[in-house]
Image: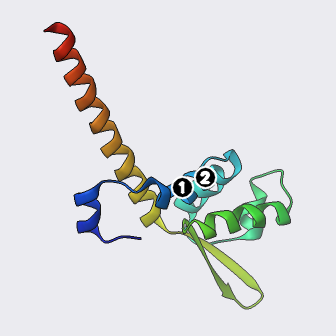
């Protein structure tokens, strides 16, 4: 990911955040993110308990979150514990806020032009 000064100078790089938005675009993965936000490091068993999915299906979703940088796994013995990495989520939120401000500015200019 780019450094902070680069972001403020050039705005959001949505192509860089594409994997994060893709990962969050699934209801099951959003549920897993919610669980990871509330529960710290959790095992596949704990994450599967709150769904109707198999362990394999939950693992597949976790790997999507991991490839987007949203979740990380630590292997302890035979078990993998999953944790949330909030940085990509913070970057996505900041990008959406910037886009929102840009839209507000554009709509303000349009309103001013229409009203005269």
Image coordinates of residue 109 in percent, x first then y, are 20, 24
Query: 92 or 84, which is in the foreground?
Result: 92
Residue 115's disc is none
Q: Quadrant of the N terminus?
A: bottom left
**Residue shown at 72% from the left, 61% from the top:** 61
Q: Residues within 10 Å of mark 1 (few under 14, many from 20)?
A: few
Q: Is residue 82 left or right of residue 40?
A: right
Residue 23: quadrant of the picture:
bottom right
Image coordinates of residue 45 in percent, x first then y, are 77, 68
**Residue shown at 27% from the left, 57% from the top:** 10
Q: Is residue 98 above or below residue 20?
A: above
Q: Secondary structure at mark 1?
A: helix
Residue 41: quadrant of the picture:
bottom right
Quickly name the residue at label 2: 22
Image coordinates of residue 39 in percent, x first then y, are 57, 63
Q: Residues within 10 Å of mark 2 (few under 14, many from 20)?
A: few
Badges 1 and 2: C-beta atoms under 8 Å apart? yes
**Residue shown at 27% from the left, 66% from the top:** 6
Query: 15 or 29, which is in the foreground?
Result: 15
Q: Is residue 73 left or right of residue 113?
A: right
Residue 18's disc is 1
Q: Secondary structure at mark 2?
A: helix
CA gap, disc 1 and disc 2: 6 Å
């Amino acid at each position: 990911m780019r450094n902070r000064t680069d972001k403020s100078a050039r705005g959001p790089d949505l192509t860089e955040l594409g994997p994060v938005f893709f990962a969050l675009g699934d209801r099951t993965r959003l549920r897993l993110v919610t669980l990871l936000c509330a529960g710290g490091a959790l095992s596949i068993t704990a994450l599967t308990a709150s769904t109707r999915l198999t362990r394999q299906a939950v693992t597949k979703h976790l790997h999507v979150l991991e490839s987007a940088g949203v979740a990380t796994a630590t292997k302890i013995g035979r078990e993998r514990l999953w944790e949330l990495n909030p940085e990509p989520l913070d970057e996505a939120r900041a990008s959406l806020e910037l886009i929102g401000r840009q839209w507000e500015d554009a709509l303000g200019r349009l309103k001013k032009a229409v009203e005269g």
